[in-house]
């Protein structure tokens, strides 16, 4: 089953750097196992463009749609047997310690 893993910042990160896993090791292990299908870091939200169409008119705005302290800073597409496996993969990601991870299964 495929999961989209949103990698987000958080206002209450882990403060002990010694506890935080290494991102390069996480990527290497999950790439090698085939659990990580694709992933990448995103540029800051200030570079975002929000696209909407209302009444047939294209409306563009700079930046994210909502003002929030927490932002999506990256993503990974996971291929896991089930949600339990996806949770274990997300749990080992460094941003689970200093940010937060949101998992969403693909439809269908």
Image: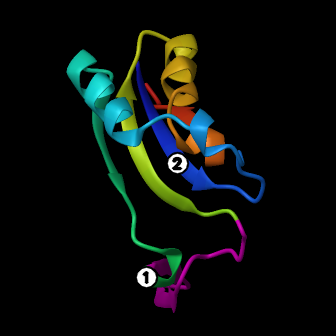
Task: Judge whether residue 92 is colored magenta.
Answer: no
85 up-or-down from 43: above or below? above
Residue at 59% across, 38% down: 18
Q: CA distance from mark 2 to mark 1?
A: 17 Å
Residue at 50% across, 89% down: 62
- The circle drawn on residue 47 is 1
62 up-or-down from 72: above or below? below
Give the camera-side residue of 3 and 16.
16
Question: Which badge, 2 or 1, is on the more N-terminal residue?
Answer: 2
Res 106 → quadrant = top left
Res 39 → quadrant = top left
Q: Is residue 73 left or right of residue 71?
A: left
Give the camera-side residue of 55 and 19.
19
Q: Secondary structure at mark 1?
A: helix
- Name of the residue lying farthest toward the right: 12
102 up-or-down from 52: above or below? above
Q: Is residue 100 visible?
A: no
- The circle drawn on residue 7 is 2
Where is residue 96 shown, x and y percent of the image? 61, 38
Q: Is residue 51 left or right of residue 17?
A: left
The residue stretch that appears in magenta = 48-69
Where is residue 101 shown, x and y percent of the image? 59, 41
Q: Is residue 76 visible?
A: yes
Residue at 49% across, 39% down: 5
Where is residue 68 shown, x and y percent of the image? 72, 71
Query: How many numbered discs sit on the rendered protein?
Result: 2
Could you classify mark 1 by the number of other residues whose Cα lies within 10 Å: few (under 14), some (14-19), or many (20 or more)? Answer: few
Quadrant where the C terminus is found in the figure: top left
């Amino acid at each position: 089953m495929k999961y989209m893993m949103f990698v987000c910042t958080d206002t209450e990160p882990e403060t002990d750097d010694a506890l935080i896993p290494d991102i390069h090791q996480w990527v290497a292990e999950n790439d090698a196992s085939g659990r990580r299908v694709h992933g990448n870091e995103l540029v800051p939200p200030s570079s975002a463009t929000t696209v909407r169409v209302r009444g047939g008119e294209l409306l563009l705005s700079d930046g994210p749609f909502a003002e929030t302290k927490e932002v999506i800073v990256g993503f990974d597409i996971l291929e896991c047997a089930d949600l339990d496996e996806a949770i274990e993969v997300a749990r080992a990601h460094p941003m689970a310690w200093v940010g937060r991870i949101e998992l969403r299964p693909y439809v269908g």
